[in-house]
Image: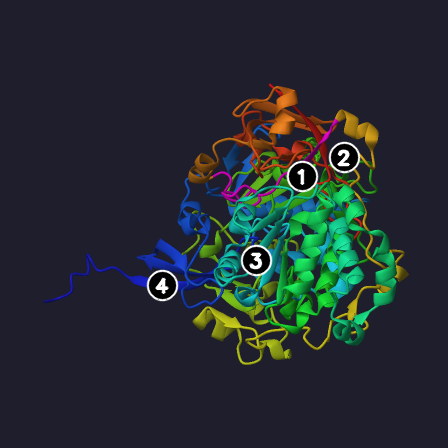
């Protein structure tokens, strides 16, 4: 019987990678029929993903095929912030941008008056940071200090360990004690959580350390709830008990660490009683946790970035990073700690980003303080901003300042986005961006040890273009003739890893494209520091950091209390007595997915968790509409009175788009632009508020 071509369907399965800012970097399989993606699932052959996706990415086709997508280039026709646009062509859009950039570059202010603003809307190395960096480097634009998420923790970890290297997530199922520190793993690190659950089934003890009784904390054997910003004190208190009671691996300390005697003297004052007072927990909890950590092995820590978004976040991470070396936990593949595995990958950032193209000595502007940067008197002022892979009006702190900055009529603003975000409403030119299914990329991970390829599954929808292609076209419009601006995405992918590094020997881009993923060339039973070999200047775990000392920092990890707390600012705490944190809502990922109807419906409305001890004296009942405020601003939410938040702490799961909230504001109305001790990171969780019933 002849084939009826009118009903024949072309069906193929395309290997890809999840692009979102999550440690899991899942391997994807997208089923495409007649050019349309019809199904997406986790790759069952990828050991880290094991066929399972989070609830958000499992519905990724709703994002790709959403009727809310920006369909074509547009220019503003209303006032800034109104979000009214008219359609233009790509030629018109590129010509407008190139003309404005060229005019600013030729003015007395120079190209430093132009600022790129981007972060981790996609984590692929091509669309995150390649052709875009080349373009802005060659243009001579201001540099962006991309520190809003993880910079303090990375800096603190590096001070002790040397680089973002740690345990293999697959080994946690063999651990006997797991401290889950500052992480709601069920929502933001699902594939670690599955291994922690397997360890639990095998008899391991799980302890959550978090001011909030998250879904993860509820499922652990023990939940310790320190006040926000006091994790460094807790780590120093654990060291005190370990050293005082001799719960140490002296052989490991003697062979593979630097500065133990100085550390021991330093933590002598951090008794359980002092630690308990600083953290707002019981002294017995400190002692019991230290004894567990010193006697149950292999002991593992999974620490995440929530706890470092405070004034002393870098030093807190330094202190936590010292703990495994004290007890010799690094000897075992199932012992040690993991913050990030990103440093295990030999990424060739120089080849991708070409910093050699930078002209002169452009200034650096910190993305955390974009609200001040757009408004304060600067020489030169920021006259143009190009936003991609980020939604600063929603996600940057002190959002009233951010909105006011973007509302400047003299600021030329370009936004390249998948959706018309809060930030896009302020654009002069709005460009349509591709989703992960519509472009090529190459990925590392900060939660496992597999390199991944993202093959393009479908043609771009509407007139969408990937970041790489837009910057190629802009470079041509600006007359940049360097050959690197003609590199294709395939060319870029081939240069992403340093080919002379043994960790990637045996596979290349073509191999990745075909297979979808490859494990780095590290042992299957990976114990990176079993015999020392730390990537620090000394080759040891550095309890004492001479490199930090030379930069004017403390040589030993210190406890730096929150800037906004009763012990450090009593007057402020009398006016605003509640510590405030805004961890990720389960159905959102930063501000990604936060506009899609299914996820907004799941979240319902912005919530604020309050303990009954804090709700009762304020006359607040469960379900009441409340206003959360401080000197920086306010927003409203629906109160949830219960025991998820510890006494003294108000918790608002975030980040909502402002225009989708009842009052047009979100949690960042009250957060601060102040920076961390190390890494110049954000201090979202160093914040005091008051709450009243509306």
Callout 4: SS:
strand
How far apart marks 1 and 3 lie (CA) works out to: 55 Å
| Residue on which disc 1 sits | 412
Front label number (4 vs 2) = 4
Q: Earlier in the sequence, mark 3 or mark 4?
A: 4
Residue ID for mark 2: 375
Frontmost residue, 408 versus 178? 178
The total number of labels drawn is 4
Question: What residue does disc 3 label?
Answer: 205
Q: Position of residue 191 (x, y in %)?
A: 50, 58
Q: CA distance from mark 1 to mark 4?
A: 42 Å
Q: Is residue 588 above or below residue 472?
A: above
Q: Position of residue 370 (x, y in %)?
A: 72, 41
Neighbourhood count class around disc 4 (C-alpha, 10 Å): few under 14, some 14–19, many 20 upward? some
Residue drawn at x 69%, y 67% as measured from the top left: 350
Name the residue: 75% across, 66% down: 326
Q: What residue is pinned by disc 4?
A: 13
SS under mark 2: loop
- Rendered image quadrant of residue 301: bottom right
Q: Do callouts 4 and 2 mark residues in contact (Cβ within 8 Å)?
A: no
Estimate the spatial distance between the alpha carbons at disc 3 and disc 4, rounded to whole Å: 40 Å
Query: Within 10 Å of the Cα at label 2, are there few (<14), some (14-19), or many (20+) other Cα atoms?
Result: some
Look at the image and tell me in which quarter the N terminus lies.
Answer: bottom left
Q: Check disc 1 and report its element: helix, strand or loop.
A: strand
Magenta extent? 576-595
Disc 3 versus disc 2: distance between alpha carbons?
A: 51 Å
Above or below for 486 versus 618: below
């Amino acid at each position: 019987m002849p084939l009826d071509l009118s009903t024949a369907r072309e069906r193929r399965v395309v290997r890809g990678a999840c692009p979102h800012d999550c440690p899991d970097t899942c391997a994807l399989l997208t089923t495409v029929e007649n050019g349309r993606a019809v199904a997406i699932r986790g790759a069952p052959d990828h050991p880290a993903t094991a066929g399972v996706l989070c609830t958000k990415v499992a519905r990724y086709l709703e994002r790709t095929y959403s009727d809310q997508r920006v369909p074509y280039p547009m220019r503003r026709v209303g006032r800034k912030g109104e979000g009214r646009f008219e359609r233009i062509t790509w030629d018109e859009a590129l010509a407008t941008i190139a003309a404005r950039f060229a005019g600013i570059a030729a003015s007395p202010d120079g190209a430093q008056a132009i600022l790129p603003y981007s972060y981790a809307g996609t984590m692929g190395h091509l669309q995150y940071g390649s052709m875009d960096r080349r373009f802005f480097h060659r243009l001579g634009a201001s540099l962006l200090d991309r520190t809003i998420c993880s910079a303090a923790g990375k800096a603190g970890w590096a001070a002790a360990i040397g680089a973002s290297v740690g345990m293999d997530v697959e080994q946690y199922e063999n651990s006997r004690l797991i401290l889950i520190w500052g992480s709601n793993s069920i929502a933001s690190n699902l594939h670690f959580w599955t291994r922690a659950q397997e360890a639990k089934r095998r008899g391991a003890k799980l302890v959550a350390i978090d001011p909030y009784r998250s879904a993860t904390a509820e499922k652990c054997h023990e939940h310790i709830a320190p006040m926000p910003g006091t994790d460094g004190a807790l780590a120093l208190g654990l060291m005190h008990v370990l050293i005082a009671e001799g719960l140490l691996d002296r052989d490991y300390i003697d062979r593979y660490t630097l500065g133990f005697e100085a550390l021991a003297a330093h933590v002598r004052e951090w008794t359980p009683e002092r630690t308990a007072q600083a953290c707002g927990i019981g002294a017995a909890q400190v002692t019991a946790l230290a004894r567990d950590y010193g006697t149950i092995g292999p002991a593992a820590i999974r620490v995440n970035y929530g706890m470092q978004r405070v004034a002393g976040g870098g030093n807190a991470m330094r202190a936590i990073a010292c703990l495994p070396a004290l007890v010799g936990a690094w000897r075992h593949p199932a012992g040690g700690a993991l913050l990030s595995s990103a440093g295990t990958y030999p990424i060739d950032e120089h080849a991708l980003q070409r910093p050699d193209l930078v002209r002169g000595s452009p200034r650096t502007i910190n993305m955390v303080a974009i609200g001040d940067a757009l408004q304060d008197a600067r020489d030169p002022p920021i006259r143009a901003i190009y936003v991609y892979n980020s939604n600063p009006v929603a996600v940057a702190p002190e959002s009233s300042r951010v909105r006011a900055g973007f509302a400047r009529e003299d600021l030329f603003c370009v936004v390249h986005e998948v959706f018309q975000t809060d930030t896009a409403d302020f654009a002069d030119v709005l460009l349509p961006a591709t989703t992960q299914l519509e472009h090529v990329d190459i990925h590392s991970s900060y939660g496992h040890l597999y390199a991944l390829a993202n093959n393009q599954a479908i043609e771009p929808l509407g007139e969408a273009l990937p970041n790489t292609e837009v910057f190629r076209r802009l470079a041509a419009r600006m007359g940049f003739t360097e050959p690197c601006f003609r590199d294709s995405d395939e060319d870029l992918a081939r240069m992403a890893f340093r080919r002379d590094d043994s960790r990637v020997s045996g596979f290349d881009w073509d191999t990745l494209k075909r297979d979808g993923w490859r494990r780095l060339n590290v042992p299957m039973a990976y114990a990176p520091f079993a015999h020392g070999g730390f990537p620090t200047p000394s080759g040891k775990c550095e309890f004492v950091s001479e490199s930090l000392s030379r930069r004017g920092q403390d040589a030993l990890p210190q406890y730096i209390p929150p800037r906004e707390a009763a012990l450090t600012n009593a007057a402020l705490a009398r006016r605003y007595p509640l510590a405030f944190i805004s961890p990720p809502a389960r159905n959102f990922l930063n501000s990604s997915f936060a506009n899609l109807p299914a996820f907004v419906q799941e979240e319902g409305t912005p919530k604020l968790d309050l303990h009954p001890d804090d709700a009762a004296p304020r006359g607040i009942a469960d379900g009441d509409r409340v206003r959360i405020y401080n000197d920086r601003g306010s927003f409203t939410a629906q109160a949830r009175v219960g025991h998820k938040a510890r006494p003294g702490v108000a918790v608002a799961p975030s980040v909502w788009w402002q225009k989708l909230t009842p009052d047009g504001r979100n949690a960042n109305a009250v957060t601060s632009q102040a920076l961390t001790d190390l890494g110049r990171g954000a201090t979202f969780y160093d914040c005091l508020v008051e709450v009243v019933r509306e």
